[in-house]
């Protein structure tokens, strides 16, 4: 007897995305590169507008992700914006997740006035 169960056998519940339905970190990284370059090109850091700008960048990233049409994915978008003062910052973020379905894309943008690290955490919603 064959007792193997496929994703479609379990009352329509999708437990794994197909290859076409997977979030690709390279696509996410490209979105981050484009959005950060568009949003921060020529921008001089001002602390009074940093929160509003980082929220705006996160919203633009979210809208671009919607265009990927991956409805089973939920996204956590993190944008860290800071002033470039000649010192270095090292940051790390991680999640416990399913390495087969979930992914992260990151990009760092910097110029002589500021740095911005943005990350997309893409989590497949079962």
Image (spheres, helix red, strand yellow):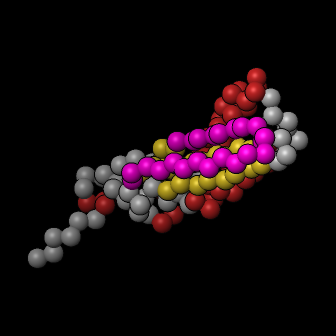
Can you say whether 99 is above or below 78 in the image? Answer: below
Left or right for 73, reference 96 = right
Q: Position of residue 80 (x, y in %)?
A: 65, 39
Quarter of the figure with residue 4: bottom left
Q: Residue at x 73, y 45 (%)?
A: 87
Can you say whether 19 is above or below 83 in the image? Answer: below
Q: Give the magenta part as a residue range.
A: 76-97
Q: Position of residue 117 (x, y in %)?
A: 66, 46
Q: Position of residue 51 (x, y in %)?
A: 69, 28
Count of marks overlaid on the render? 0
Q: Position of residue 16 (x, y in %)?
A: 37, 59
Quarter of the figure with residue 30: bottom right
Q: Residue 64: in sight, yes or no?
A: no
Q: Residue at x 51, y 63 (%)?
A: 20
In the displayed orientation, state which residue is furthest to the bottom: 1
Q: Residue at x 39, y 51 (%)?
A: 96
In the displayed orientation, state which residue is furthest to the top: 48
Q: Residue at x 65, y 35 (%)?
A: 59
Left or right for 47, reference 25 = right
Q: Nearer the viewer, residue 51 or 63?
A: 51
Q: Nearer the viewer, residue 18 or 40?
A: 40
Q: Residue 115: in sight, yes or no?
A: yes
Quarter of the figure with residue 6: bottom left
């Amino acid at each position: 007897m064959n007792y193997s169960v496929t994703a479609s056998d379990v009352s329509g519940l999708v437990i794994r995305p197909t290859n076409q339905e997977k979030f690709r970190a390279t696509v996410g990284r490209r979105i981050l590169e484009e959005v950060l370059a568009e949003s921060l090109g020529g921008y001089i850091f001002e602390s009074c507008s940093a929160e509003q700008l980082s929220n705006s960048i996160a919203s633009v990233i979210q809208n671009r992700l919607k265009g990927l049409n991956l409805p089973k994915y939920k996204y956590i978008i993190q944008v860290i914006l800071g002033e470039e003062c000649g010192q270095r910052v090292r940051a790390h973020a991680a999640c416990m997740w399913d390495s087969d379905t979930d992914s992260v894309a990151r990009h760092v943008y910097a110029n002589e006035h500021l740095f911005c690290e943005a990350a997309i955490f893409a989590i497949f919603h079962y």
